[in-house]
Amino acid sequence: MVNTKDLEAHFEFECKACENGRCAKADVNSILSERKGLRDFYEAFKEHIKGCKRMTYGQYQFVIDREVLPEAVLWWHNHPEFKETHLSTAVGTDERPLNGHFVYMPFLNVQVEFANEPENYWVFLRTYLLADDPSFPSVAEKLPAALWIEREVKDLLGFKPVNHPDPRRLILPEDWPEGVYPLRKDMDYRHSPITEPKVEFKEKPEDTTLVPMGPAHMGIEEPAHFRLFVKGEEIVDVDYRGFYSHRGIEKTGEGRLTYNQVLFLAERICGICGYQHSVSYAMAVERLADVDIPDRARYIRTLLLELERIHNHLLWVGIAAHMVGYDTGFMHAWRIREPVMWLVERLTGNRKQYGMNIVGGVRRDILDYRKEEILKVVKQIREGTKTFLDVALNTNTFIKRAEGVGILPYKVAKAYSVLGPTARASGRKIDVRKDQAVKTATAYNEIDFKVPVYKEGDVLARVLVRMDELFESLWMVEQLIDQMPGGDIMVPIGKLPEYEEALGFTEAHRGEVVHYVMTGEKNKVYRWKVRAPTYNNLPAVPEMLKGYHVADAPLIIASIDPCYSCTERVQFVDVNTGKVKVLTEAEFNELSIKYKGVF
Amino acid sequence: METAVKLGFSLAGIIIMLFLPPYLDGIARRVKARLQYRRGPPLSQTWYDLRKLFGMPSVKPTKKALFTWAPYIALASAISAALLLPYGNVVPVDFGYNLVVFFYVVLMVSVFLMLAGLTVQNAFSHLGSAREMQVILTVEPLIAILYGVLAYNSGSLDLYTIMTGLHLTPSLVLTYILLAYALYVESGFVPFDIAEAEQEVIGGPLSEYSGRLLGVFYYAIYIKRFALLWFFISLLTLPWIGPIGTPEKAALVLALQFVLTVAFYPIIAALEATNARLRIDHVVKMNTRAFFAGLIILAMAFMGW
Amino acid sequence: MAESASYTEKLKRWDRFKAEKFSKKAPVTTPYPFIDIEKPPEYRGIPHINPEKCIGCGACVNACPPDALIMEWDKEHGVKRLTYNAARCIRCARCIEVCPTGAMEPTTRFEVATDNKEDLVEVVEHKLAYCEECGEYLDFTERQIEYVRNILPKDVFDAYALEDRIKLTQEEKMRRTVIKLRETEGNVYPAFMLVRETKDDGGEE
């Protein structure tokens, strides 16, 4: 590994906030004193901090030496005061066309205090890696939350996490050749090489039988491959191989999508939490463009987000019932769910994939004559769910299967940075809706709701957390209807600033969804990183499975509400900007028409 | 004349036993659908399914003969179990000591299902077979004890004689209750369909079966369920209606048996629909408890209560 | 496109279920496709190109995220072809929002089941404007130019002398500019500026 000192010699770091690019010399006091903890971090890693800036409200970035990366991440993650701080994910970017380096940037959700939005913030730890030696010390060695993140950048960008405990392939298929990295900018998106498949599975422990669950299995709706090593019926060890639905939507996007078109792609990352992705992406772009969207748009977004949460939780509880053979529960949960889909179809024009967002607001207004119907549906759902819970939670066999099964202890949940209801069922008091500043895109700061937290950590606790959340969401929908302000529903955004970064996030029904956007030239996106909550939750599933029965496996896997397509998503939409090409007149005309039509 | 009547009743029994079971499943499907606010398939849907399966070739993952023969042996066992039961006052196949034979042939269906699962190299089949075995091992002793109570109570091992010779004691009432549980478990209804759990072990022993062989297995299972239910219904009705002298009364009894069987199936379906599947350790625990309860009942029966 | 619903239409003709009787017994099961289901007016269905209104500007093509709308030029035959493929369409209705003439029409149709994929494709062909001077086709359709004529104020037309130039190809315009520049020596404007101005006006909208 080359020392960063060598790197400094030929590279000047850019720093927005500091005058000459070095925090040590510049007056950084104003930034460091904005939030609690920033100065402590600065003091602790003074030697290694090369720059710092405030990306946008509540999002801070430090440029640090890569040698101290594990220490820096752990400093935040294990902060004695900020108990629920977690490693959200990391972005790897090929910035060689810009500055000749790779960038690896883990970021953390720092929770100074629960539900204290002005105090909490995001910390980005940007490290520059050399173009010819993109290695960095592995964080995963000490923090399991980084296991997948580092395997991902290893696969897609060719970074080398030194001392990674499990450096197997994660995302790329088995027959993808070594040394070809799809996320690098010099890789053509049409290029899809194939070699001999090389399978790397975990060794089978002695005296165990292998039960392969998946890639196609009844209990798993989407392709995922759990290899259960069992003794009798008890699960001893688990190996996971997924990413069979890595879709590479980037091919559609490459080279022609503008920031507003990416929005529709973002909505299609997931089948059922698409709107969360859409809002997250829109929020990221609005943040970096520094636009405040109209209040009415924020309320409409929040309304739809909560309606989505309601039907997703009902869907999930149905699936959980189905997994233990309680099909009546399954059918009734989905029957109760249907009016929400019916309602949303009337509000947005579609049952799913609402297509309501546009960067800067929403596309359709909610008409007054539909308000009545919203309230009617809310009432209907509340009664229906109450009856359903009354029946389901009094079904002995169902409770027997869910109680005390798949226990995820608090410590493991924290170490894996588990998110959402899964984390809240294990006693983690986190919720991005309350923790972080979502007020630029949504209206959560203006309405009242509680965040249910259970300590048991079993499947039943996950059921109860979700059902409590559902009732909170119903209450929120009623408030939103009451308080909805009038006015515009969108502000147009012209040109985006170039090479700016920002993060957009929402609390989806599975946990926090994070969209990192870095803009390129000409209103395009240079780097778009999506992290669905299942990406953080799924690595913890093997921990939950160990010691339970094969019969419990489908229920336990389902209990985190996994969404494989979200997790395995579109990696990015990268656009080859700055590439000079001689256009024919016809092409030129096409382009000139193109960029007029968008805005 | 008497032979003709006997032949007629046997024929009626055979027709009922061959054609009713899939319709019973159709009833169950309909009842479940209604409980779920759905319309549900037509009553003969199970027949359509079977017809489709019978018409399709089977994919055989192994060359072992048992894989091919197991479904047929299971079907034969199920049919012979059904033939040992009284239809009206006629038992189509009567050897004497029918109770023991009935116990064994019913068991054979499960055993061949289990063995079939073990012939293939499939972890799910093996898991399913292992579960089936655990269920059999825990529920069969219980059934044996309960049959013992019945035999002791009536002083016979012949099914028809038992059914006509039972006299009401407290132990017999308890036996009926426990027998209902044991036969329900043996029939493999939810929450005891652990061996064939779809979400967990993809159908267990059946996971490698397809086409005609799968159809035969399903048919065997439906007939077995019918046989167990018919047996229980006969136990409930026959002892208390007095001697059956005339063919007219026998026909009435047969009709009663038929109606009660059809009427009981919706109850079973409702039970199925309102329960989640149990785990194998739960079932083993429950069966063990029931076994000890059975021992107590047996002791009671010996004391003459 | 009009044929695409035929499959379900055929099914409906069977009329096997009476909807009222049906819903009383089992409230969840609907005998779809044997009945019509309610489509709210808000529903975003398959869009439809109204060939009478379409001017072939391609605004919808630029806005379309999944490339369901494609624009092709066939200069040999003087045709500009706008193709809409409902199989690629994600029903986001962006095309309807950006259409300057309202030619992209929303519908509430959603049934795309068909045994012929061509049913899902709509093609609108436009005549390209013809440059009399150089004998070639322009990149713009005749309707586009007509539309520009209608919406641009008269004084703009006069100021740029568009009436003469609007039906010329790019080359011809450039050639004329160069000639003009040669004629008027000492012109302060660089040549490209003149070219660009005229080009802009020739565009859509």
Image: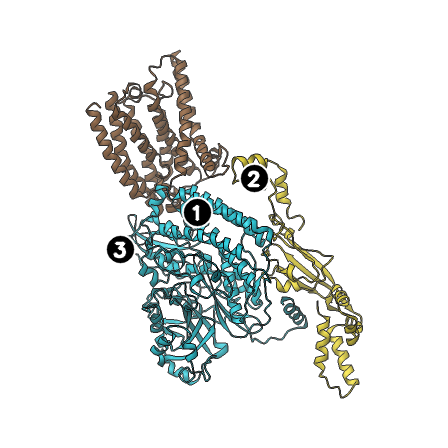
- Which chain is indicated by disc 3? A
**Mark 2–mark 3 distance (CA, rounded to whole Å):** 55 Å
What colour denotes chain B?
brown
Q: Nearer the viewer, mark 2 or mark 3?
A: 2
What amino acid type should be assigned to the residue bearing mark 3? Answer: Glu
Residue found at x 54% / y 35%:
C24
Are the numbered discs 1 and 3 placed on the same chain, yes or no? Answer: yes
Q: Which residue is mark 1?
A: A318
> Which circle, 1 or 3, is nearer the viewer?
1
Q: Are marks 2 and 3 on the same chain?
A: no
Q: Which residue is mark 2?
A: C31
Furthest-left residue in this view: B303
Asked if one can make out residue A241 in the rendered structure from this viewpoint, the answer is yes
Q: Colour of chain C?
A: yellow
From the rendered image, report the letter of the chain displayed in cyan.
A
The chain to which mark 1 is attached is A
**CB atoms of marks 1 and 3 within 8 Å:** no
| Residue B88 in the image, given as x and y percentages of width and height | 38, 19
| Most foreground residue, A47 or A142 | A47
Residue A206 is tagged as 3
